[in-house]
Image (cartoon, grey):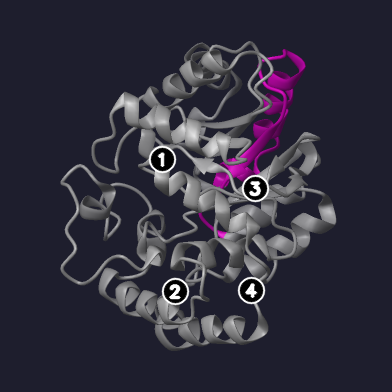
Amino acid sequence: MESRLLGRTGRSVGVVGLGCWQLGADWGSVSDEAALEVLGAAVDSGVTFLDTADVYGDGRSEKLIGSFLAARGPNHGLTVATKMGRRSDPHVADAYTLSWFRAWTDRSRENLDVDTLDLVQLHCPPSEVYRRESTYDALDVLVDEGRIAAYGVSVETVDEALEAIIRPHVATVQIILNVFRRKPLEQVLPLAAAEGVGIIARVPLASGLLSGKYDEDTQFAADDHRSYNRAGEAFDVGETFAGVPFEVGVAAAREVADLTPAGATTAQLALRWIIDQPGMSVVIPGARSAAQAVANAQAAALPPVDEETLDGLRGVYDGRIRQHVHARW
C-alpha cells in the first residue's frame, strides 16, 4: 500500500487506515473475536494506521487494540491514534486542562498498554478550546513528559480546522470528508499541505451510505447511532450519514453506484476519491467484518479516479447534496 507522511508526526502510514469506533460501540454488536479479526485482516492487507478514542465503548476499542498490539509483538510497525476530551461534558470548555489531559492520557496508555501514545487528538471539543493558547501549552507539556509523541485535533467545522492548523505543533487534523462532504477541499486541505499538517479523513463512506448497499427501508439496531442520532440527538449530526438526510443520501448513493467502474465497489470508489485529494494523508473507514476491512484496504490499489467519473460525482453532489449542507460545515 502507498504510504504518506502523517503531517508533523514524522511517521509514514498507509493511505487507507482503520477507524475503530465500531469496535467499541455505537454500530451494533461486534464481538471481541470479530473485532480482533477485523484488526488482523486490515493490518495483513497493508493498513498501518489505527484510529480510536477513549470513549469508544468506554475504552473497549482501545483495550482491543492493545491486545492486538501485544499479540503482534513490539515490532508491529503500526501507528495508533486515540482521542481525548469526551469523558468530560464535551460542551464545557473549562474541562480541557492539563490535569484532565494527564488523567485521560494515562487511562489511554493503560488501555493500549504503551508508555507513550503515538498521537492524541482533541475529540471535537467546544470551538473555544481551539482558540486558547493554554490548550496547546498543556499539550506541549504532555509531549515533554513523554506521555504522548504528538498531538492533533478532531474537528467538526472548517473554522476549527483552520484555527488548529496554524498552531506550530499541531501534527494532524481529523475532519469529515467524503463525496457528500466536500467543504474541506476549499481551504482546509490546501492550508494543511502548506503548513505540513496531516489530514485524517473520517466518515469517508457517510456511515455506510456510500457502500451503495442501503435503501429507504434499511433498518439499524437500536444501539447503532444511525438509528438514534439522525437529527443530532446524541452528538453532532454530521457524524451520522455526514449530516445528509438518510433518504436523500440513499438516492444519491444510487447515482454514485452507477458511476462505479468495473472491478471496483462503490465503497472503493468513494475511498479512492478521498485518497486522490491533494494534501490527504490517510482515510479511516470502519469495518465490522474481516471482508470489509480487506475490501477497504484494496481501494488503495485502484487507479486514480478518471475525469469523467469525477464530473459525475460532482454532479451528484451539486444535484442531490449541496442544498442540504449546513453552512458551518
| x then y, percent, for residue 266 | 45, 68
11 relative to 192, above or below: above
- Quickly name the residue at label 2: 325
The amino acid beneath tag 3 is Val
What separation in Å lies between label 1 and label 3 (alpha carbons)? 27 Å
309 relative to 103, above or below: below
Precedes in sequence: disc 1 or disc 3 = 3
Precedes in sequence: disc 4 or disc 3 = 3
Q: Does dot 1 land on a helix, a strand or a loop? A: helix
Precedes in sequence: disc 2 or disc 4 = 4
Q: Residue, x 37% and y 23% (percent of image)?
A: 60
Q: Does dot 4 land on a helix, a strand or a loop? A: loop
Q: Does dot 3 land on a helix, a strand or a loop? A: strand
What separation in Å lies between label 2 and label 4 (alpha carbons)? 24 Å
In this rendering, would 298 be left or right of 152?
Answer: left
Does any portion of residue 227 appear in the rendered image? yes
Of tags 1 and 2, the one toward the viewer is 1
249 relative to 84, above or below: below
Of tags 4 and 1, the one toward the viewer is 1
The magenta stretch is: 128-157
- Quickly name the residue at label 4: 305
Of tags 2 and 4, the one toward the viewer is 4
The amino acid beneath tag 2 is Val
- Quickly name the residue at label 3: 173
Precedes in sequence: disc 4 or disc 1 = 1
- Quickly name the residue at label 1: 290
- Within 10 angstroms of label 1, few (less than 14), some, or many (20 or more) residues? some
| x then y, percent, for residue 133 | 71, 37
